[in-house]
Image: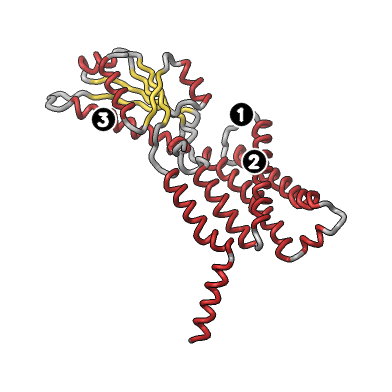
Amino acid sequence: MKQFIGFVKKEFFHIFRDRRSLFILFGMPIVQILLFGFAITNEINNVDVAILDHSNDETTKEITQKIAASNYFSIQNIDNEKEIERSFEKGVIKAVIIFEPHFGSNLIKTKRANLQIVTDATEPNTANTIVSYTNAIVYSYLSLINQDKKMPYAIDTKTRMVYNPELKGVFMFVPGVMTIILMLVSAMMTSISITKEKETGTMEILLVSPLKPFQVIVGKVIPYIFLSIINATVIVLLSVFVFKMPIEGSLILLAFESILFIITSLALGILISTISATQQTAMMISLMGLMLPTILLSGFIFPITSMPKR
């Protein structure tokens, strides 16, 4: 039993002597729980929403003020329908709330008025959440004005999803998976490959060869650049021909941005390899330091607009 206790103590001492292991065990979880705890939320906060008020009466102003008073939306006004498409294309808004002409008078005379919500459905979950929150605010306004009313007022809310009317989740998840795969191949595999050379002792052999150090690193990286480009091409082809995902923008720009992302990921992989002594350490840092933030903070699962700016 004493031998076993001594062995356990030795393992504790071995862990505490290794600063890298301590950082992985205690540093990364603390940083990530603080980062993700503040940044990640299923709710929407301060989402940019435009108001197109064709009526501009007291009732529409009250509803607009009630929407603006919530912490969910940041309100801006637009003057006509032509601005809707331009605002969506620039990405300055996520939804438009449109009040019909004579909204207030229709509500008083016929006990019914119409309101339309137009949302950017490139992120289906965010679009549905915006519609749900807006409806909840409108219904709370109705419940307030319908108190002690024998014939209650009603507001008919109509919803239109642009860019993704069928709310296909694959249109959002396929580009997100593309980012994750490129990060996996580029950063993780590069860091493990270089660390393996250090761990097995062959890096010293390479460094005393006629090749210069930067040539050794570039030579290790170039194959992963080509492999990542092939992966990106295959993903785009599968997206278009299998999942029928439309690509409306420039393919040249998409290729340039993909190559830039690949090079940046490879640089991060090289950085990880410089601070990692073993392949296991490189893998853990790549997974916890790169993969989780890429998945959780990139807008792949949770909307970026809901994350705090600071």
Going by the numbered disc 2, the residue's amino acid type is Phe
Where does residue 270 sit, x and y in percent of width and height? 68, 51
**In this picture, is 85 found above or below 33?**
above
Going by the numbered disc 1, the residue's amino acid type is Gly
Residue behind mark 1: 249
Q: Which mark is residue 261?
A: 2
Instruction: Indicate which disc, 1 or 2, sits on the residue closer to the N terminus.
Output: 1
Is any part of residue 185 visible from this angle?
no
The residue at the point 51 percent across, 57 percent down is 27
Query: Which of pointers 1 and 2 indicates the residue nearer the eye?
Result: 2
Instruction: Indicate which disc, 3 or 1, sits on the residue closer to the N terminus.
Output: 3
The residue at the point 81 percent across, 57 percent down is 207
Going by the numbered disc 3, the residue's amino acid type is Tyr
Which one is nearer the viewer's eye here, 183 or 212?
A: 212
Residue behind mark 3: 139
Instruction: Indicate which disc, 3 or 2, sits on the residue closer to the N terminus.
Output: 3
Q: Which mark is residue 301?
A: none
User: Is label 2 in a helix, a strand or a loop?
Assistant: helix
Distance between the alpha carbons at the discs numbered 1 and 2: 18 Å
